[in-house]
Image (tube, rainbow, N blue to C red):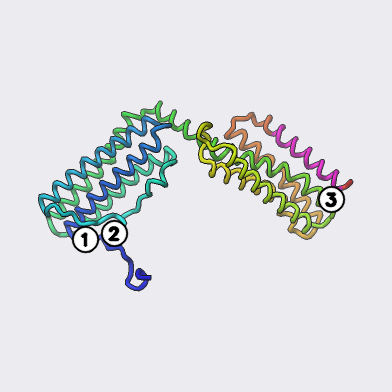
Amino acid sequence: MLTRLFGSSKRSLSSLSEQEVLALAISNEEDDGRIYMAYADALRASYPNSAKVFEEMAEEESHHRQMLIDLHVERFGPRIPLVRREHVREFPERKPDWLIREIPISEAREQAQAMEAAAERFYQNAASRTTDASTRKLLGDLALAEKGHENLARRLGEIHTPDDVRREEDQTAHRQFVLTWVQPGLAGLMDGSVSTLAPIFAAAFATGDTMQTFLVGLSASVGAGISMGFTEAAHDDGVISGRGSPLKRGLASGLMTAVGGLGHALPYLIPDFVTATALAIAVVFVELWAIAFIQNKYMETPFFRAVLQVVLGGALVLAAGILIGNA
């Protein structure tokens, strides 16, 4: 309400005094150092070499922070104004610690580079807005310091994560992605696509009513999705197995189960029974081929074996549903 009445609570960069810009630089170094330590803590168990990179970057941020504090004390005294990045309109925001506890290794590397590049641009922008020689020099020095941080990140990466280590860490990240998202999602897609075939097509051929068939498919798909999601999340907390967050796995499994069933239930929104059934059967084979493709790409199952297992199994369930519906 106050923001709507009096405007944004954030100040513009051009409104900051030289002392406030220096205070902002100090708080920026503090925050970035904490973020790098959070990255190190999040990655230490699975990626110890990359964790060392972020630890040393955090130490470097602490060193520059102390240099900035010494400069502030020399020029303006010991009282540092409270100016943080969230108080300045142009300054990019950072994620809090609790949002980066399970950050992927590739995203951590990209975020580190983006942080330093954004900080460098910020100081260059601030320097271009002032005509005071000492302020311009101060901001230019800060921009060079941030550029030095970016080079340091690259240099530390070369020391602690050479190509062979990085490849190993990337493989670990890929394996974690498969365990957390692909495997539960694939299990859900298979269950939703195959297990709902019999009730949907049995209802279709028993009633000949497209709307009734759709309602059967909708209830079967949603019910199976809820059941699979809760089962996946509850049966393994991921601590011992290393399969990742149960919430993520439950979401992947539940959503893909529902999607698998809805794929061939939605065509029955078409009033014409023959058209709806033909489209539903076509969707079934697309789903089964998609499952075979995912198995081949992420689970390294030979493609033709995956096709034989999935398509043959699905075709048998489909045939069973049609026979039961016509009985």
| Depth order, front residue of 61/12 | 61
What's the magenta bit mostly, secondary-structure-wise?
A: helix
Q: Position of residue 192 (x, y in %)?
A: 68, 44
Q: Residues within 10 Å of mark 3 (few under 14, many from 20)?
A: many
| Depth order, front residue of 239/40 | 239
Determine whether 177 is above or below 272 in the image.
above
Q: Is there a contact, CB below 8 Å, between mark 1 and mark 2?
A: yes
Q: Is residue 175 visible?
A: no
Residue under label 3: 205
Which of the marked residues, 3 or 1, is nearer the chain's N terminus? 1
Horizontal side of 105 relative to 132 (left or right) equals: right
Residue under label 1: 16
Q: Is residue 311 magenta?
A: yes
Q: Residues within 10 Å of mark 1 (few under 14, many from 20)?
A: some
Determine whether 99 is above or below 81 in the image.
above
Tell me the kind of residue under disc 2: Val
